[in-house]
Amino acid sequence: MHDADHETPEVPERTPAVRTDEPGAPSDEPAPQPKSAYELPSKKNTVLRNMVWALLLTMAVVVVVGIAFFGVGSQPEREPLANSELDVAASAERARDVAPFPVTVPAVGEGWTERSARYTAGANPQWTIEYTSPEGQLVTLVEESELGAPMLSAAIPGSTVEEELELAGATCSLLRGERSTAERGIACEGAGWGFVVHGNADRAALEQIAGAAVTSLD
């Protein structure tokens, strides 16, 4: 008899255990979920939102106040401001109390606008009035105790005398500025006063203000 062949049963191979502590090994922990686009309110974003609302509210208040104060746009039909003649007269009265010369307030004609009037104290006290001519040009009158070269130079730099003339009984000079400007002026003087009227207006306009200034000093 032959011995029966005894076959050794095959032993199944063991699957090697996977170490979770190795890099790249799968983990039993659940994967993190993506964040939602809608987050619950937090202290940080609540404060930021409150600041934005406060800023918008402040800007709205400023706009409302600005509209109430200045109005919206230009309104040609709006009544113009009261003529500044009363202010000029009041300034002249105050200047007369301290000025070392008689203060002139010319009686301007129709179409002229008195823009400002001021008295400046100091080493050389000065009275100044600014006008807008009927043609819209600026004309300035400057008066001091006497008609000096510094005042003329400041009013019309590089001025030269073109003509001597008389206005309302006062001795005056027609002046012209440097060639680079169209500045012209009329300078007049009397007992204890001297003034110059200057601007880009024509001669007739300058003579009108100068003559009225001399008349107011009589």
Image: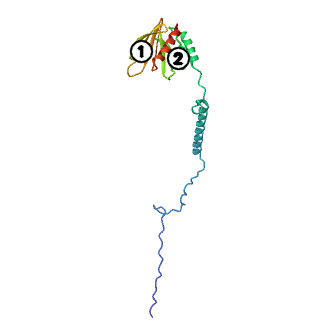
* Residue 127 visible at all: no
Say few, some or many: other residues with alpha carbon within 10 Å of mark 1 (under 14 / 14 to 19 / 20 or more). many
- Residue corresponding to mark 2: 117
Determine the residue positioned at 57% across, 45% down: 45
Check residue 175 in the rendering and tell me which mark sits there, or answer none: 1
Which comes sooner in the sequence, label 1 or label 2?
2
36 in relation to 71, above or below: below
Amino acid at the residue labelled 1:
Leu
**Residue 52 coordinates in the image, percent (x, y):** 58, 41
Q: Nearer the viewer, residue 70 or 38?
A: 70
Viewer-nearest of labels 1 and 2?
A: 1
**Residue 104 coordinates in the image, percent (x, y):** 52, 11
Amino acid at the residue labelled 2:
Ala
**Residue 101 coordinates in the image, percent (x, y):** 50, 8
Looking at the figure, which quarter contains the N terminus? Answer: bottom left
Determine the residue positioned at 42% across, 19% down: 183
